[in-house]
Image: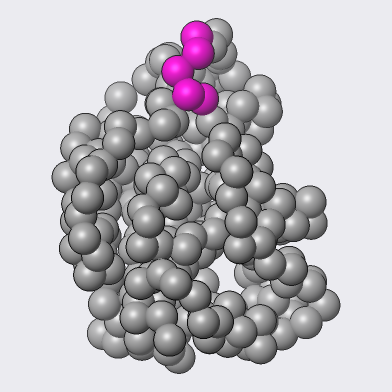
Amino acid sequence: MVETKFILAGFPRTGTTVLAGSLILHPQVLFYGELFNNTKEVRHTEAQRITLGAGWKFEEALDWGISACRYTESTNAYVDEFFARKIPFNAIGFKIMYDQVTEGPNSDVWDYLAAHPEIKIIRTKRENLIEIICSFVRASMTRRWHTTGEELPSHRFIVPPQEFLALMKRFETLPEPMYGIDETHQILELDYHRISTDFQGCMRDIYSFLELESGSVVSPRLKKIARLKPNKELANYEELKQHFQNTQYSKYFTF
């Protein structure tokens, strides 16, 4: 039986995929991408370990592919089988985003994770919601969710206030079972800024948390795409700042 079970969780655009890119290389870890991605094709390639992190194709030839979880079924049996396999690894885990499977049969994966305190949780955070939204909108518009360092053009865009509000609510709301999870589970929380500036330190903390030999830590394979600050990238930044000035979201307009 595998010694350590874990998940890597976070909101989109908070650094989960760059961490996953190194986790999958550790010889003692069997790691999968977004097994509960909301897109069928991505869910399939993540389960097959063809891609890692919403379609980022991994260069190395990988094995240990599994069948994708069906949308129409409870996840309990699937996750049980996932973690119960006899494998020659010390740790096994997968990545899941907080805004995935928030409804429907698969949404009970959150209850499953909450009910199994033996599953360790690595979670990422990014303090400023506006940075998350800018990164998400940019990626959605350009269809570039990742880059390994190639030069990309800068973009400016407009996000209407109501759409902006919907995104802020989306990226601040945890699945209900994840509230209070700190009281029952072992948690390692990593901030996006630290992931960006101290990647090797973050990976060493992850290996220690998973009780693995640290080994060598490679440089991150993915690079930041952002070229502009949100007040420059959002063409209607001042309009949004004024619109939300008397709300709980005004604290994020600090650029």
Quadrant (top left, top right, bottom left, bottom right) of the C terminus: top left
Q: Is residue 220 above or below residue 85?
A: above
Q: Is residue 178 above or below residue 124?
A: below
* Residue plotted at (66% across, 61% down): 65
Residue at the limit of the structure toward the front, as seen here = 88
Depth order, front residue of 172/104: 104
Q: Is residue 149 magenta?
A: yes
Q: Which residues are magenta?
A: 147-151
* Residue plotted at (54% across, 59% down): 32
Side (left or right) of 139 relative to 216? right
Magenta highlight: main SS: loop
Q: Is residue 113 magenta?
A: no
Whether residue 238 appears in this view of the structure is no
Quadrant (top left, top right, bottom left, bottom right) of the N terminus: bottom left
Side (left or right) of 139 relative to 198? right
Side (left or right) of 74 relative to 90? right
Q: Is residue 131 above or below residue 210?
A: above
Give the image quarter of residue 210. Answer: bottom left
Q: Is residue 233 above or below residue 172?
A: above
Residue 223 position, x and y percent, is 41, 26
Residue 113 position, x and y percent, is 48, 81
Side (left or right) of 120 relative to 155? left
Give the image quarter of residue 182. Answer: bottom left
* Residue plotted at (55% across, 8% down): 153
* Residue plotted at (66% across, 47% down): 50
Residue 248 position, x and y percent, is 37, 52
Whether residue 101 appears in this view of the structure is yes
Residue at the limit of the structure toward the right, as seen here = 72
